[in-house]
Amino acid sequence: MKTLEELRKIREKAQQDMKLRESNTRIKIVVGMGTSGIAMGARDVMKALMEEIANRNLADVLVTQTGEKGLSSMEPVVDVIEEGKPTITYGNITADKARKIVAEHIVNGKVVNDFVVTAQS
Amino acid sequence: MSLKRTDILLCCGSGCVSAGALKVKQALIDELKKQGISEEINIIETGCMGPCDYGPVMMVYPEGVFYRKVSVDDVPEMVEEHFVKGRPLKRLMMQDANEKIFDQIKDIPFYKKQVKVALENCGFINPELIEEYIAVGGYEAIGKALTEYTPEETIEIVKKSGLRGRGGGGFPTGLKWQFGRASQDPVKYIICNGDEGDPGAFMDRSLLEGDPHRVLEGMMLAAYAIGAQKGFFYIRAEYPLAIRRIKNAIQQAHEFGLLGDNIFGTNFSFDAEVRTGAGAFVCGEETALIASIQGKRGEPTSKPPYPSTSGLWEKPTVVNNVETLANLSTIFNKGPEWFAGMGSETSKGTKVFALTGDLNNTGLVEVPMGVTLRELIFEVGGGIPNGRKFKAVQLGGPSGGCLTSEHLDTAIDYESLKAAGAMVGSGGIIVMDDSKCMVNIAKFFLEFSLDESCGKCTPCRVGLKQMHEILERITSGKGKEGDIEELERLGHTIKDTALCGLGQTAPNPVLSTIRYFRNEYESHIKYKSCEATICLPLMHFLIDQDTCIGCGLCSRKCPVSCITGSQKEKYKIDQTACVKCGNCAEVCPVHAVKRIPGTGYTKSDAKNGLYE
């Protein structure tokens, strides 16, 4: 270790690996993983989301899960929660649709209107 | 790169490990694999999270869910519900009296009053990864000190913070460093005192286990300030995990160039190594500790010379406690004013306490100096269990003293506790309910000091033995008039004449219990009665004739056949033959066998109305 800058660089990198333990992520993606969600393939959706985010190296996005949301006929259901913006709920999501959501909504900030169920502020 | 969606922080402090944390970890690994989600979830072993009573405990991020008392049998349900379906398992979460679940860990009363400085990262980072320590700001303080401050300025910052030695003595750390700095010698040493010996204290172990890099960084700051090139961690061999973690930390620091030559491109070069002790209490005394590192018998020497002028191998040496060192990086990162803003007039910052004894929430806590004993015992500690009453609290382990309910509003700082007859000490707090006999407690602590006395000086070696014999006499019913005065005389003499801190403080538990519970000593001696019914020769068993159903079980289980009676007449104990084994009380199906103070048969007892 020769300089403080060197230390700070190591720190920034190390913080990436610990971001789950902090609450200051930009976007939270919540997958409904109730019984019906799982039956409709929510696990594949979640896997696809995580792969896509990892491949794109998106550091400020968090994928997490929740229980049954009540929208059984539209499972799998995915929420995209962003500070200061309406929460977008997507329905009938598949792995491919999930990848599209990452590419368009998460990266480019454009809501994928075709899949939207509700938008709540 | 594989993305993880959940971090499971599993407390692997010694408390949780003995409660089965490692088995839970294995079960989690197996179950996650079975569900095919191992790839998505991190399992991280951390240091002590604090609430040891509830172990094994774990935190799950990003949700911030706190689970307690997790058993291997709970794991399949937890994995299925929480990690697959995303529904936190409510029955394993902390609940209040109305079974309401606490959303945030900071809402739990145990954590509410706590301010974590030394324990900041304990239970939050993986202690075996230097990267995690760096991620939370680690090694920034030493980097800044080396590149921006002179050693004198470094000492000045610590002085300004008001930090005092956390090992018990409470000596101002900055001043100690200044003495070390002032000693003119090209070779100097810094020692980290990790010889935590008080029964019931485990903060040093938890820090070394849970955040070893923090202690190492603190040592580097101290070394830079005094001008030492070499540091030693003196840790007792009974702490194998602490030793392993600190060795691992030293190795990683080497790999990152944080130990060795020209650290941060400056001309500061430093290295550290671990020396293990054999677990003698006296080796926590700095001169005995130094002797032990040199391979000599662990015996103290008289001061002066102080180690800061002539210590390890006759070189200037500064000995700092683990917790003292653990406070340093935060003092530098947040500023000495921030640290001095907490605490009381003379005692700044926070202190870690190990809460044990008759408490609802035992464990490791860190509170600002100056909180009252009441807050610590009844709010953080959750009060006394089983509907019993608070009787006394022993502070500072076998070197400290007992305080009573009158002192509950005493602020916890070095001066207030000393004035009341106890001490902060290393921070062990043993709470006792009203079922405890104070004479017996005093005997227990004295026995510990007697065992641990190194035998070098006469007052400690012989004096403690004398005191112990008197206590032995009193608790076995042979106490006589004048014993209390003799205990006091001996105690004060030993305090004044013993060579080191062990002997000078060993009489404290006896002196303080005499001071606050003299009536208990008196009733043991004069009335041959132990009111708490702990001292067997001074209590007896009595069968309550109204409750007895005459089943005769007690009589059959009595090893000396001293219980006679019949179903009609009920059963009675012959007190002169009873050996007080307690079998009868244990087997009685209707709890008719009572423990009664007094021997149960002498006339003087009867006269004083101390037994029925």
Image (cartoon, rainbow, N blue to C red):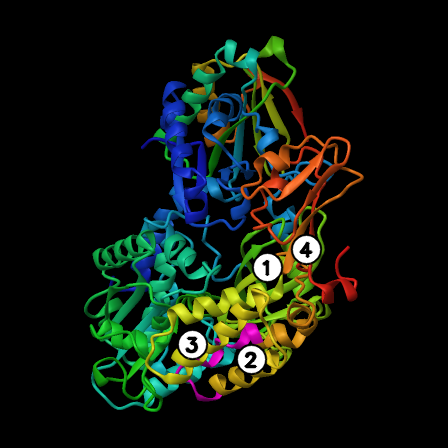
- Specify the subunit that label 2 lies on: B
Q: Residue at x 48, y 88 (%)?
A: B496
Q: Position of residue B253 (x, y in %)?
A: 26, 58
Q: Amino acid at mark 2?
A: Leu
Location of the N terminus of chain B by quadrant is top left
Q: Please tell me whether mark 3 or mark 4 is closer to you in this view.
A: 3
Between residues A80 and A70, which one lies in front from this camera angle?
Answer: A70
Q: Amino acid at mark 4?
A: Glu
In the structure shown, which secondary structural element does the residue marked by tag 2 occupy? helix
Q: Please tell me whether mark 3 or mark 2 is closer to you in this view.
A: 2
Residue B23, relative to residue B466: is it above or below?
above
Report the residue marked by disc 1.
B537
> Magenta stretch containing residue B198, yes or no?
no
Badge 3 or badge 4: first in the primary sequence: 4
Report the residue marked by disc 3.
B502
Q: Report whether mark 2 lies on the same chain as mark 4.
A: yes
Between residues B49 and B255, which one lies in front from this camera angle?
Answer: B49
